[in-house]
Image (spheres, coloured by chain):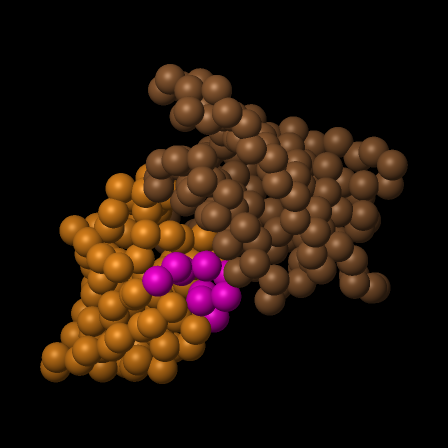
Chain colours: A orange, B brown
Amino acid sequence: MNINVKSEGNKKWIELDGRLDTTAAPQLSEVIEKELQETVKELVIDMEKCGYVASSGLRVILQAQKNINRVQGSMVVKNVNETVMEVFEMTGFSDILTIE
Amino acid sequence: MKQLSKQLKLPAELDKLDSVISFLETTLWQCDCPMKIMTQICVSVEEIFVNIANYAYPDNTGECHLDLSVDYEAEAGCNQMTLCIHDAGKAFNPLEKEDPDITLCAEDRQIGGLGIWMVKQSMDQVKYRYEDEKNILTLTKTW
């Protein structure tokens, strides 16, 4: 998976390109841990180029949401395709996450 | 109606996950399986394969076998995939795992426990049996 990060003030934009599977999940976790400093109040995860999420990927997304909650920030998951949306719905993540 | 059957045997190791996914994609692609169904099948098999790779053989290395059979080119609702996943590791029925509470808020959510739940939700049928010292999980999906 390719992960691109863009910064804009206290906002981070993370674009996922490829499968968010068990192999890619630790990679994303590392990026989020590195990028999500105390000063970051807004996190965007762009999934336009990611049509595959395994439970290991969900764990990383949940961890990111918990971390941003802790600093009273906000996280948005953008451009979710139909298959990934179904995964979010069947796991209740659609109630936890802000999906645009 | 056409039928395609393929087998894959490989070490139950995490770095073989890509081989498992390629095997599924290549075979299902040949059967004109819709992308959405293919992704559901791949995610489900990933969850099971990763469990086997992580837990089935704690003291040694072992194999995982996939027997895939697809009936296709049928009218909508009659195309069917059946996949048997075997391992000869310690007996473990993943279907006995308690379902996660998917209504909890982010803070109360446990990190984990979602994999088998996703398999149960995505497949039409999931069955487990232990036979000849093998764990055999059978997944069925119709489209």
Q: Which residue is drawn at 56% across and 58% down?
A: B19
Nearer to us in this view, B53 or B100: B53
Q: Quadrant location of residue B82? A: top right
Q: Is there any visible trace of residue A95 in the rendered image?
A: no
Q: Could you tell me if residue B123 is visible in this image?
A: yes
Q: Nearer the viewer, residue A32 or B17?
A: B17
**What residue lies at 42% left-to-right and 42% top-to-bottom?**
B29
Residue at 30% in and 77% down: A36
Q: Residue most toward the right?
A: B132
> Taken as a whole, is the magenta stretch helix, strand or loop?
loop
- Residue A66 part of the magenta-drawn span: no
Which residue lies most toward the front here?
B2
Residue drawn where x is 20% and y is 71% of the image: A13
Instruction: Count numbered badges in the picture.
Output: 0
Residue A22 inside the magenta-drawn segment = yes
Left or right, B142 with respect to A93, comes to: right
Spot the residue most to the left: A9
Q: Residue A70 location, x and y as percent?
A: 32, 68
Front in this rendered view, residue A90 or B28: B28
Task: Judge left or right: residue B25 versus residue B129.
Answer: left
Which is nearer the eye, B76 or A86? B76
The image position of residue A75, as x and y in percent, is 23, 62
The span shown in magenta is A18-26
Q: Quadrant of the N terminus of chain A?
A: bottom left
Q: Quadrant of residue B73?
A: top left
Image location (x, y in percent) of residue A88: 34, 45
Apparent side of residue A72 relative to residue A25 in the rendered image (left or right): left
The percent coordinates of residue A92 (x first, y second) are: 37, 41
Q: In this view, does B2 lie above or below B20?
A: above
Where, by quadrant of the figure, is residue B75 drawn?
Answer: top left
Query: Please, is residue A88 above or below residue A22 in the view?
Result: above
